[in-house]
Image: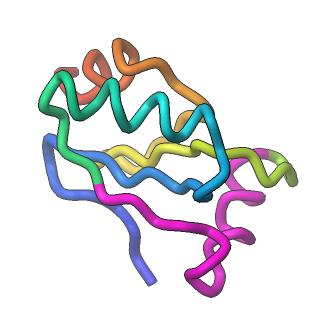
Amino acid sequence: MDFTPESGTITMFSTTWCGYCNRLKKQLDAQGIGYTEINIEEVDGTAELVEQLNGGNRTVPTVLFPDGSAATNPSAAEVKSRLAA
């Protein structure tokens, strides 16, 4: 399954209990940055994908950008900057 987002948006892998995920979502919402949230505890195969992107660690939030690159626990400013690049 391809989780690469459309241009100008991100895919955010998260869990319901992750405080960092909730903070990033609020910041993205406040800045009007679009995202698709994928709960790695509910979508088969996504926990393993997050582990691949993070050197074996199941760390969230992990953000996937339209160019196929990823970031672990980025700030909203980093997300905005990378989407503008």
Residue 56, located in which quarter of the rendered image?
bottom right
> Which residue is drawn at the image coordinates 70% and 69% (left, top)?
47
Classify 25 as above or below 46: above
Q: Which residues are magenta?
A: 36-54
Nearer to me, 79 or 18: 18
User: In screen coordinates, is 41 left or right of 56?
Assistant: left
> Which residue is drawn at the image coordinates 48% and 44% (left, top)?
63
Q: Quadrant of the N terminus?
A: bottom left
User: In screen coordinates, is 12 left or right of 72?
Assistant: left
How many labels were placed on the picture? 0
**Is 83 included in the stretch rendered in magenta?**
no
Residue 82, located in which quarter of the rendered image?
top left
**Is 46 included in the stretch rendered in magenta?**
yes
> Which residue is drawn at the image coordinates 62% and 73% (left, top)?
46
Q: Colour scheme used in the picture?
A: rainbow
Coordinates of residue 2 in the picture (x, y in percent): 40, 76
Classify 30 as above or below 25: above
User: In screen coordinates, is 67 left or right of 12?
Assistant: left
Q: Quadrant of the C terminus?
A: top left
> Which residue is drawn at the image coordinates 60% and 32% (left, top)?
20
Nearer to me, 4 or 62: 62
Coordinates of residue 30 in the picture (x, y in percent): 20, 24
Coordinates of residue 9 in the picture (x, y in percent): 21, 45
Nearer to me, 8 or 76: 76
